[in-house]
């Protein structure tokens, strides 16, 4: 039997509303985490979302940021390329974007400048070897 006390009715209504909002929030959060089938987000997702990017700096995983830093160091050693802006970012679908100046590339192999392409490949190799 449903109580006729208005405080009980309002309390039950607010409790139901709270649980509905909680469930909707969890569903939306699960959709935002992407295609992860384990039910947990990779560690880099949490570190990226809590990091405050520099002004104009795109957000990428810590691994991509480390490789970006190595590429920037290599660019400084080349007089022709040292003023070139390189930025790694993460697109809305989670894939890597490599910005060179105003141009965006989603694959290293599609970068037309062979020197830059080689610098990125060397930085990736150095990172993977743990000597960066």
Image: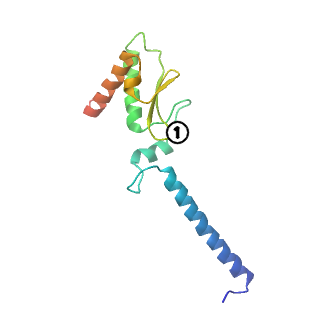
How many marks the image carries: the answer is 1
**Residue at 73% over, 86% down:** 4
Rendered position, 82 above or below 70: above
Asked whether, in this view, residue 130 is left or right of residue 22, the answer is left
Asked whether, in this view, residue 4 is left or right of residue 74, the answer is right
**Residue at 41% over, 18% down:** 112
Q: How many neighbours does mark 1 have within 10 angstroms: few (below 14), some (14-19), or many (20 or more)? A: few
Residue 5 in which image quadrant: bottom right
In the image, residue 28 lies at what x, y percent?
Answer: 55, 55
Rendered position, 79 above or below 32: above
Rendered position, 8 above or below 16: below
Asked whether, in this view, residue 36 is left or right of residue 101, the answer is left
* Mark 1, residue position: 52
Can the viewer see residue 132? Answer: no
Secondary structure under badge 1? loop
Rendered position, 121 above or below 83: below
**Residue at 46% over, 49% down:** 34
Display colour scheme: rainbow
Can the viewer see residue 24? Answer: yes
Residue 117 in which image quadrant: top left
In the image, residue 109 lies at what x, y percent?
Answer: 37, 25
In the image, residue 77 lies at what x, y percent?
Answer: 37, 14
In the image, farthest residue toward the top: 79
In the image, farthest residue toward the front: 110
Asked whether, in this view, residue 113 is left or right of residue 50, the answer is left
Instruction: For the N terminus, give its image quadrant.
Output: bottom right
In the image, residue 118 lies at what x, y percent?
Answer: 33, 20
Instruction: For the C terminus, give its image quadrant.
Output: top left
């Amino acid at each position: 039997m449903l109580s006729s006390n208005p405080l009980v009715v309002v309390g039950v209504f607010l409790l139901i509303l709270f649980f509905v909002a909680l469930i909707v929030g969890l569903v939306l959060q699960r959709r935002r985490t992407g295609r992860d089938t384990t039910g947990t987000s990779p560690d880099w997702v949490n570190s990226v979302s809590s990091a405050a990017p520099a002004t104009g700096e795109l957000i990428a995983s810590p691994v991509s940021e480390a490789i970006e830093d190595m590429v920037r160091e290599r660019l400084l050693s080349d007089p022709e390329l040292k003023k070139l802006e390189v930025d790694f970012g993460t697109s809305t679908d989670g894939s890597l974007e490599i910005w060179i100046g105003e141009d965006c590339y989603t694959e290293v192999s599609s970068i037309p400048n062979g020197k830059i392409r080689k610098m990125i490949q060397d930085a990736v190799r150095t990172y993977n070897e743990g000597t960066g």
